[in-house]
Amino acid sequence: MSFNLLPTLPILVPKAIAWAEEQQASIAKVGLPLDESLRDLATGVGVRQPESIRICEVARLPLPDDPLLREAALATGLLGPHMVGLTLRYGVYICHGHSNIRLLSHEFRHVHQYERAGSIAGFLPTYLQQVVTVGYYNAPFEVDARAHEVVYGA
C-alpha cells in the first residue's frame, strides 16, 4: 500500500457512498432479476427482498473515476484484476465466466448485510473501516459472507 488509508477514510467514505449509489442505480436499469432458484438461494443466506436484487455481468468490475477512491479500492483489494464479484446493496456485478453458486451466495450475503444496515450509507462506513483496519480477507463482513457460501449447489 502506497499510503495509510485510515486517515483518509473521512474523505473516502462519502466518495465511496456516492460512487456505490451511482453503480447500484446503473445495475438496477440493466441488471437481470433473479430466477426462482437464485431467489431461494438469496433467501437461504438471509436476504429479505430477493426480488430487488439485479445481477449485471461485466467483462471486469468498474473502477471509480476519482483518483483517490480508485487508488484506495485497488490498494485494499476491494477492486482490481482478481476480484470477480461486487455487491452494492441490491446491485451485484459478476465478471463474465465467474457466475457460480458459491460466488452468488457470497454476494447475496452482502445484500443481506446491506439490508441490515439499511442503506449503502449505513453499510459502507463500517465495511470500509473493517477493510482498512484488519484487511479485506479478515474483515468481519467478508468472514460472514464466506461462512454463508453454498459450495455444492443451491
Image (tube, rainbow, N blue to C red):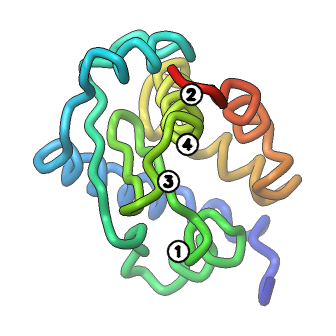
Between the residue at mark 2 and the residue at mark 3, the CA separation in whole angstroms equals 12 Å
Given this view, does label 3 or label 4 mark the residue nearer the observer?
Answer: 4
Question: Is label 2 in contact with label 3 (beta carbons under 8 Å)?
Answer: no
Question: Is label 3 in contact with label 4 (beta carbons under 8 Å)?
Answer: yes
The amino acid beneath tag 3 is Gly
Residue in the image at 68% along x and 24% along y: 148
Say which label, 2 or 1, has the lower sequence index: 1
Question: Is label 2 in contact with label 1 (beta carbons under 8 Å)?
Answer: no
Between the residue at mark 2 and the residue at mark 1, the CA separation in whole angstroms equals 24 Å
Pick whichever, 89 or 3, lies toward us.
Answer: 89
Residue 69, label in figure = 1
The amino acid beneath tag 4 is Leu
Q: Which residue is mark 2?
A: 109
Pick whichever, 110 or 98, lies toward us.
Answer: 98
Say which label, 1 or 4, has the lower sequence index: 1
Q: Which residue is mark 4?
A: 103
The amino acid beneath tag 1 is Leu
Question: Is label 2 in contact with label 4 (beta carbons under 8 Å)?
Answer: no
Q: Which residue is mark 3?
A: 85
Between the residue at mark 3 and the residue at mark 1, the CA separation in whole angstroms equals 18 Å
Q: Please indicate, yes or no, whether residue 122 appears anywhere in the rendered image.
A: no
The amino acid beneath tag 2 is Arg
Query: Which x, y percent locates residue 101?
Result: 51, 34
State the count of labels. Answer: 4
The quadrant holding residue 136 is bottom right
